[in-house]
Image (spheres, coloured by chain):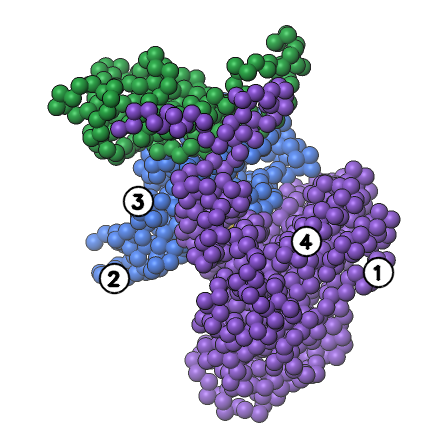
Amino acid sequence: MTANGAADVFLLDGEPIPFAPGQTVMQAALAAGHYIPHLCFHHDFKPHGSCKVCTVRVDGATTASCTLPAQAGMSVECKADDLEENRRTLVQMLFVEGNHFCPSCEKSGNCLLQAVAYDLGVLDADLDYFFPSRPLDASHPDLLLDFNRCILCELCVRASAEVDGKHVFALSGRGIGKHLIVNAESGRLVDTTVAVTDKAVDVCPVGVIIRKRVGFAVPIGRRRFDARPVSAQALEDAPRRAPPEAAP
Amino acid sequence: MSRSAQREGSPVNDGAPRKLRIATTSLAGCFGCHMSFLDIDEKLFDLLRHVEFDRTPLTDIKHCGPCDIGVVEGGICNAENVHVLREFRRNCKILVAIGACALNGGLPAQRNHVDLGACLQEVYLTEPGLARGCMPNDPELPLPLDKVHPLHEVVKVDYSIPGCPPPAEAIWSFFADVIAGRTPHLGHGLIHYD
Amino acid sequence: MVDAAPPSPNVARLDAVVAAHGARATELVQILRDAQALDGWLPPATITYLAHRLRLPRARVEGVAGFYAFLHLTPAGRYRVLFSDNVTDRMAGSLDLLDRLCTSLWIERGKVSEDGLVSVDTTSCTGMGDQAPAILVNGRAIPRMTPERVDAVAELIRAQVDLCEWPADLFAVADNVHRRDVLLDAIVAPGDALRAAIARGAREPERAGSARSWREGVPALPQGPAATLEEIKRSNLRGRGGAGFTTGLKWEACRTAPGTTRYVVCNADEGEPGTFKDRVLLARHADLVLEGMTVCAYAIGATQGFVYLRGEYEYLAAPLRATIARRRAANLLGTSILGQRGFDFDVVLHLGAGAYVCGEESALIESLEGKRGVPRNRPPYPVTHGYLQQPTVVNNVETFCAAALIALNGGDWYRGLGTPRSTGTKLLCVSGDCARPGIYEYPFGTTVRQVLADCGAERTQAVQVSGPSGTCIGAAEFGRKLAFEDLPTAGAFMVFDDTRDMFEVARNFAHFFAHESCGFCTPCRVGTTLLRNVMDKIHGMRGSQHDVDRIRRLNRLLQASSHCGLGHTACNPLLDTLKRFRPAYERRLQSLDFEPAFDLDGALARARAMTGRDDASAHLAEVDEDASAVAGRGQP
Ligand SMILES: Cc1cc2nc3c(=O)[nH]c(=O)nc-3n(C[C@H](O)[C@H](O)[C@H](O)COP(=O)(O)O)c2cc1C
Ligand code: SF4
Ligand code: SF4
Ligand code: SF4
């Protein structure tokens, strides 16, 4: 409870954040206009908690903020140097794990991984690259799958199951061998029920699921995150919830 | 970084701060980063008031001597690249990787999932009309490595300027910071991977 | 969404497999195991057909199959030989034996022979540390491998003898119990502990009635369960699976959680390398384990139980099922157990399929539900939202045994054993450099030195307590006590004498974690592989201080942001050995500064071969020859 007893709040880097019952720290923070860096979180879906970029500290313990239920009075630390350092390393890990050649990627400038990396001031990967071999799937007439850029956020998996009701995508393998698969015995996208209009196609934060023949409609340099950093835009994406009876 | 050391080959000390000595080179790159460097345009004159060039594509110096800053464009795709990179590392107090190819291998590294043998075979033996169907074996030619590597996998790199190429403003911002004795910092709009 | 069934050669046999599991999607892992038994792998058409029969998306089924190491989506050979690859197996010469088998069969490790007959590879510790080196053939354990036994196996494979006709002595697994205490000495007739639990309620109503806050908000219960729970709480029993959570509190939380059905799960995944006590308990004291589960069911009001048995112990499945059946016949399982109206509880056996992470309780539950074994987000915890989102108790095999003894003898009796904060006894799994490897039961609080003396260990350099995720200690610490308050342990006790290279021990563990990471979260998925690579780099004599710093940085990240205990502990063996056996690392470090991870000259080998060149400039030295000359030039 706040001092005036109006609403439940917790502190995020010292700032009071109101929240509704059932909200996680991430959901409440975004709704209140505070950005916490994230990749696998998407406001349309149940928090997943796998990328760990949103890790924060509460009472000395670190945990992913997207899955952490908000509780009145908790004090959440997000901007600490060590947390930021860890976030940079996580992003660098995702870069070396796949093959990200941004100059030839249609998603460049609209890509969340890139944008989060820019925002965190990531200049290079620092780690040794894995250079995995991941062949493309160009079987579908309207869609291309470039697995080289997959960050395994499972947003397409969740969107296809929950919104499109199709289960076009799933994960297989484990550990560093974990990878995206499609719902067809042939293993090819063309043999699934995917449609260009699917939410799963839209939701991919990076350049894996690409619509054919529409690339580069907006030139590089004039794309979404060229204009403003993701930290300034994530707030606009998030459904704002007026803090329940917060303002006096 | 220390800027007090005075050494041979530097201009006469007229009381002004010693000029920073800079070397640059392009390895497995396309010279795009160098072109972007030149795109700082009139700021080149500002720069030249504070720096002097050792080995660069602009000077005729064949080997890098002791320098304050070495700027390397391009990744490492052959033995020659390794020698040059090591020369830079030995001689430069600060080694800067510039551009996508230096940082992650870039376009040349797209060959990394192809077997080098198969690649050479295809280019020199199988593919008709090339090199009269024989494998070039002149000792003058640097041998290719089986994979293209970014610089930081071969030597320690001190700073990186990303981009393909990095915007001229980012390059200028880096030099401006160094000249002013500040820790280089690239803000929004200056960090680009594309 | 479910398409018409495509033709499949196996339809009739697959139908039988599906039917045997009631066509339940929650049984997917079991169904895939059984389906694989038909062909030795899971062909695409099989996956498609099973998905169709279970009304699951095909990609879901493929994704589950792709998760488990023992399920194969590509042909793996009619005989699949896996060498246990724990460090203790290696110390016993497993790699030479592996090479011997490969040579004998004319195959390359990790590849299926051209005729599709056989493949030979390694797998994570198979729980035979006291009789290493061990192998699995099509999932069946064969311990104590020797050159002779390897040759025998090779011969049987070449002659294509059916596995069930292989000589029985190959499969004989020893128990090797060397020290007994209250648990291993207990003579408990099936049902005794249950009868005591039921009787206790009737006998001691005052104590149950005077119990404290735990009764608040609890639906009215018969005295027996309440009194039983009270005894477990009084005993101060803490979980034996590693985390050491107080069992009584767990049971109580489950009992009071709202739900329609309550579940009891016995965690017999025993994946921690160097641990094998649950195998012995299940082999010799299966009744006690099941009795403990039933006591738990009685105390919390659960109706369904599962034993999640690791795939490596498949050979224990049939005897366990027989024990379950026997207990059912004796009315110790089933409905109205021992004539108590409403006391209904039964147990089903589930087999794992090669995934260490499935020992983590929420991953285990996912696996029980027929999914990929990925740990869940917690909270909520299994005690409130476990199997099928219902209240579920997950306990280790040994915990259930102790619970049964407590039900029989009372909590006060149990808390008189061990130390105040670690009551009772603990089974240790002693392996490595000692004269008498095997199972030792001690009261908590026993020193490491005592154990070393009892097992005949000499010139001991180090002990890995509780496996790779535990602690590695050196001789200076052998006075420490095995107890939650000093050296907590799930049981593993791997001994290394002064001839062992502790760097290689840590490297083996780094490989283990990289192999077993479930891949859900970024820090562990990528981090465990980076750690493995760094250790291989140092092993290859290309390490530098830079790499040691990297290990420390990765540790901070994995500690702070991993999703489960696997990632949290993955750096432990590296940090422990760095701290205590630093020279083992330093001997290998090439420089203080930086070394590439790969051999630059080696990276030219392919080009040299293609061009036929071998001149000086076709090579790269570790350091350029002109380096010294150039470096001398005009340095300030
Ligand atoms: C990666 C990982 C593996 C685990 N493996 C096992 C195991 O094989 N057996 C076990 O009993 N507990 C294992 N645990 C601990 C379980 O999550 C859980 O704490 C335990 O089964 C609870 O039972 P207990 O309270 O009786 O110890 C593991 C935990 C983690 C994080
Ligand atoms: S997906 Fe994003 S980070 Fe990856 S290559 Fe494309 S733009 Fe770059
Ligand atoms: S394809 Fe895109 S949305 Fe799907 S898991 Fe990969 S990165 Fe995430
Ligand atoms: S820490 Fe490792 S094992 Fe645990 S959830 Fe993350 S990836 Fe999976």
Asked if the residue under mark 2 is in contact with the one under mark 1, i.e. CB atoms within 8 Å, the reply is no
> Percent from the top left, x then y, of residue C274?
60, 62
B168 or C417: nearer the viewer: C417
Chain on which label 4 sits: C
Dot label at residue C94: 4
Q: Earlier in the sequence, mark 3 or mark 2?
A: 2
Q: Are marks 3 and 2 on the same chain?
A: yes
Dot label at residue A5: 2
Q: Are marks 1 and 2 on the same chain?
A: no
The quadrant of the rendering that contains the C terminus of chain B is: top left
The quadrant of the rendering that contains the N terminus of chain B is: top left
Q: Are marks 4 and 1 on the same chain?
A: yes
Residue B126 appears anywhere in the view: yes
Tag in front: 1 or 2? 1
Image quadrant in which you'd find residue C75 = top right
Residue C15 appears anywhere in the view: no
Residue B48 is left or right of residue A192, and the answer is left
Task: Name which residue type carries label 4.
Answer: Ser
> Percent from the top left, x then y, of residue C304?
64, 69
Q: Are marks 2 and 4 on the same chain?
A: no
